[in-house]
Amino acid sequence: MARSTAPSSRSAQVDVRQWMGGIRLSGFMMIMLALVVLGALVLVPTVGTYLDQRQQIAALERSVRMSEEEVAELEATRDRWGDPAYITTQARERLYYHRPGEVVFLVDNDLPA
């Protein structure tokens, strides 16, 4: 009868020294690795600056859009004030002007308590 033996714990372990010994680093590999690290160190702040600038541009575009909307509203108000009927209505409502011969009634505190 054949005995099945479990692999010993020693053969299941990886010998780190043997694995590291299999990696061969040449001078060219070291120089290339150094250049990659240096490139990453140079590009990371540049990317951060780029992202900050994009956020500032987006904020300024929102500000410009809001200003354009405000200008459009002000132009519409200016155009309304060019209409004589609007001016008459505003004078009656805001300043309580009336035409000669009209009887004006002002009701104060007309809402129940």
Image: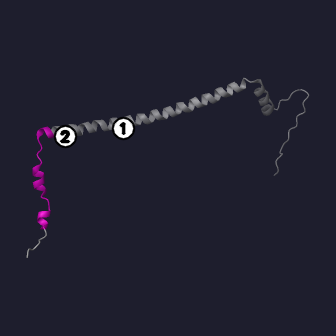
Secondary structure type for disc 1 = helix
Q: To which quarter of the image does residue 43 belong?
A: top left
Q: CA distance from mark 2 to mark 1?
A: 23 Å
Percent x, y of residue 112: 82, 50
Which residue is pictured at 21% across the width and 37% down the height? 35
- Density class for disc 2 (Cα within 10 Å; few <14, some 14-19, many ≥20) is few
* Residue that carries the numbered disc 1 in the rendered image: 48
Residue that lies at the very extreme toward the front in this rendered image: 1
Magenta stretch encompasses residue 112: no
- Density class for disc 1 (Cα within 10 Å; few <14, some 14-19, many ≥20) is few
Report whether 54 appears left or right of 37: right
Percent x, y of residue 71: 60, 28
Report whether 104 appears left or right of 33: right
Give the amino acid type for the residue marked by disc 2 in the picture.
Answer: Leu
- Mark positioned earlier in the residue sequence (2 or 1): 2
Tag shown at residue 78? none
Main secondary structure along the magenta-highlighted residues: helix
Q: Is residue 24 above or below residue 61?
A: below
Which residue is pictured at 68% across the width and 25% down the height? 78
What is the magenta range?
7-29
Residue that lies at the very extreme toward the bottom in this rendered image: 1
| Callout 2–callout 1 Cβ contact below 8 Å | no
Percent x, y of residue 29: 15, 40
Report whether 87 appears left or right of 16: right
Report whether 26 appears left or right of 107: left
Q: For the N terminus, give its image quadrant.
A: bottom left
Percent x, y of residue 46: 33, 35
Which residue is pictured at 12% across the width and 44% down the height? 25
Q: Total number of numbered labels?
A: 2
Give the amino acid type for the residue marked by disc 1 in the picture.
Answer: Gly
* Residue that carries the numbered disc 2 in the rendered image: 33
Secondary structure type for disc 2 = helix
